[in-house]
Amino acid sequence: MELLTPLLRSSAVSECFSDAATLQGMLDFEAALATAQAGLGIIPPEAAQHIAACCHSHLLDSAALAQAAAQAGNLAIPLVKQLTALVAQRDTDAARFVHWGATSQDAIDSGLMLQLRHAIAITQQDLNRLMAALVQQITRHQDCVLVGRTWMQHALPTTLGLKLAGSLDALLRYRQRLDEMRSRVLALQLGGAAGTLASLRGEGDLLVTALAARLQLSAADTPWHSQRDRLLEIAGWYAGLTGTLGKLARDISLLMQTEVAEIAEPAAEGRGGSSTMPHKRNPVACAAILAAANRVPALVGGLYAAMVQEHERGLGGWHAEWESLPELVMLATGALHTAGDLIAGLQVFPQQMQHNLKLTGGLIMAESVTMALGEVIGRQQAHQLIEKQCHLALAQQRTLLDVLLEDSRVMAHLTPERLAALLDPQRYLGSAQTFTQRVLDQASRLTAGAKRHE
């Protein structure tokens, strides 16, 4: 639904999979095919010129093409017919060489590769934008202490810097995977009717090399009509990325709950409002990201199922990819674009974080006391002792410090000053700063490396 595109598919990647872009991808294949064949002497140069001149999507009757596709079984068959008719209007001899030696799947798959190449380029820009926003927020808040939560409960203190660095660390790995897979997955499809290019006699392999170079795609060692691992790798990358973004959105939405209120989405007029409750400020960006994370697994599951294709050209499995893969990529990149806006404008409330750190009356620091006491009396004995004192503090609704100060077994080994220091969240952050800085350094190296290759 186009009405929901700004909400769920907000990235410019959505334009890569418009009807016009889909047709143009196939037409770009046809134009390059003819030009490459002319360069090898397979078809006359004049024919290639006439064919290329007609390979523009606005020259096609897309409505008629769509209706014809229902009878033909795919879009390429009526596209080639319309293209042939257009070329014939310019030169009847040239029309004989339209789609020479290729099959419909060659046009559709190679056209899709061109669309995906454009989509991946935009994706990389949005990914870099999100990572840059995370670097800024991490740098700004790397000393900001908040409650670390496990099983949805208060666990130990952590920092907002480390919390966000976990997401950045994952995104750095996705960026590395993207760089590694690009040349492997963006491959030309050219196999002819049954994957042998027999209609081109002995020149098929030369044409594959020439056409791949012209389209700036990898030259596959064999036609991959029924070997769909490349598309699955692309889908898996986008699906994994969406899951990582979903985790980020889930955490932010939980931290936005009224009872927590430690961070908030960017504020703007009309953003996150309710149709009936004037006070509401809903996590709308998180909702859009989580919607994508909810839908994408089913789409990638369908692509896994579509891998089981028959013999040299599949029946149904190939067709199942046509809408599923673009929809998956558009949802994933919509979530990515939304996440970039979300992190760039993220609001942080350190005072509320300090308030929440005190909610348990010091119980969040029980491990700190346990470890210090364990150095003297042993960890297990210390654990049992402090656990009982935690239960007592809860039962009496007192702070852990007050309860421990009255316990002679504890005070025999710890001074009041030492105990107060052990109960200070700022002093129990372990290697949080080291971990955070390590991720920031990795992001800096990636950025520097990218600039060197520009």
Image: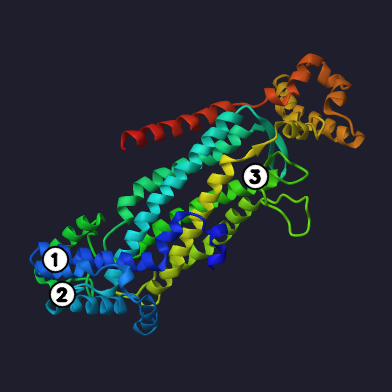
Which residue is the site of mark 3? Answer: 265
Residue at the (40%, 74%) spot, across then down = 319
Disc with the residue nearer the chain's start (2 vs 3): 2
Q: Label 2's element?
A: loop
- Mark 1 closeness class: few <14, some 14–19, many ≥20 residues within 10 Å: many
Which residue is the site of mark 1? Answer: 37
Q: Quadrant of residue 218?
A: bottom left
Check disc 1 and give the amino acid type.
Gln
Residue at the (30%, 51%) spot, across then down = 183
The reply to whether residue 109 is in sight is no
The reply to whether residue 41 is in sight is yes
> Residue 150 location in percent, x, y?
68, 42
Q: Disc 1 vs disc 2: Cβ atoms closer than 8 Å?
A: yes
Which residue is the site of mark 2? Answer: 97
Q: Label 1's element?
A: helix
Q: Label 3's element?
A: loop
- Mark 2 closeness class: few <14, some 14–19, many ≥20 residues within 10 Å: some
Check disc 2 and give the amino acid type.
Phe
Residue placed most toward the observer, 146 or 376: 146
